[in-house]
Structure formats: C-alpha cells, structure tokens
C-alpha cells in the first residue's frame, strides 16, 4: 500500500475497475435477459406447434 493518496490495492486501480465492473454487469444482465426471452419464445413456439403440454385438462 502506498500512502500517496492513490486508491491502489494489490495493483488494481479501483477507480477504473468499478465502472468496468458496472458496465460488465449491465451487459451481462441484458445478455441473460435476451437469452432467457429467446429460449422462452422458442419453447412457446414449439409447444404451440405440437399442441402438447396442456397445464389444464381442456376438452376441446
């Protein structure tokens, strides 16, 4: 630890790493949301196409 006022710890500049962490976390959240939505829409399309997987016993 140097006492020169810089917030260096273990060679990492935390002043630069927090925006990078926040940006990476935001991008990861968006990618996860898009992937989950695409998987959900794909499975819903497949289920509607095959006509299977009824949660309720519908007589129609």
Image: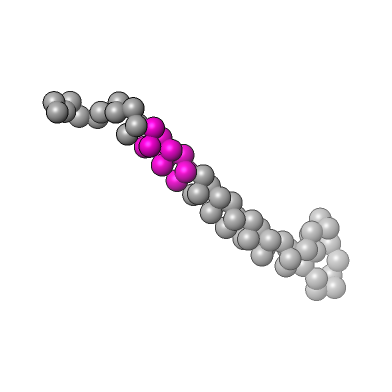
Chain part drawn in magenta: 36-46
Q: Is residue 10 left or right of residue 28?
A: right
Q: Is residue 15 left or right of residue 52?
A: right
Question: Of all residues shown, which one is farthest toward the front?
Answer: 49
From the image, give the main secondary structure of the stretch colored magenta: helix
Location of the C terminus by quadrant is top left
Q: Is residue 55 left or right of residue 40?
A: left
Q: Nearer the viewer, residue 5 or 40?
A: 40
Q: Nearer the viewer, residue 27 or 40?
A: 40
Q: Give the image quarter of residue 59.
A: top left
Residue 7 belongs to magenta span: no
Q: Nearer the viewer, residue 28 or 42?
A: 42
Q: Give the image quarter of residue 9.
A: bottom right
Q: Is residue 42 above or below residue 12?
A: above
The structure residue drawn at horizontal position 25% and vertical position 28%, both measured from the top left corner, is: 54
Residue 42 belongs to magenta span: yes
Instruction: Give the percent coordinates (x, y) of residue 27.
Output: 59, 56
Q: Is residue 17 above or below residue 28?
A: below
Instruction: Give the percent coordinates (x, y) of residue 12.
Output: 79, 59
Instruction: Give the percent coordinates (x, y) of residue 17.
Output: 72, 61
Q: Is residue 58 above or below residue 37?
A: above
Q: Is residue 53 visible?
A: no
Q: Is residue 17 above or below residue 37?
A: below
Location of the N terminus by quadrant is bottom right
The structure residue drawn at horizontal position 74% and vertical position 66%, both measured from the top left corner, is: 16
The structure residue drawn at horizontal position 38% and vertical position 37%, both measured from the top left corner, is: 45
The structure residue drawn at horizontal position 84% and vertical position 70%, both measured from the top left corner, is: 3
Q: Is residue 15 visible?
A: yes
């Amino acid at each position: 630890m140097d006492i020169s006022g810089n917030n260096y710890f273990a060679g990492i500049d935390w002043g630069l790493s927090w925006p990078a962490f926040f940006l990476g976390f935001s991008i990861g959240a968006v990618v996860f949301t898009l992937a989950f939505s695409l998987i959900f829409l794909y499975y819903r399309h497949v289920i509607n196409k095959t006509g299977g997987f009824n949660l309720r016993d519908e007589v129609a």
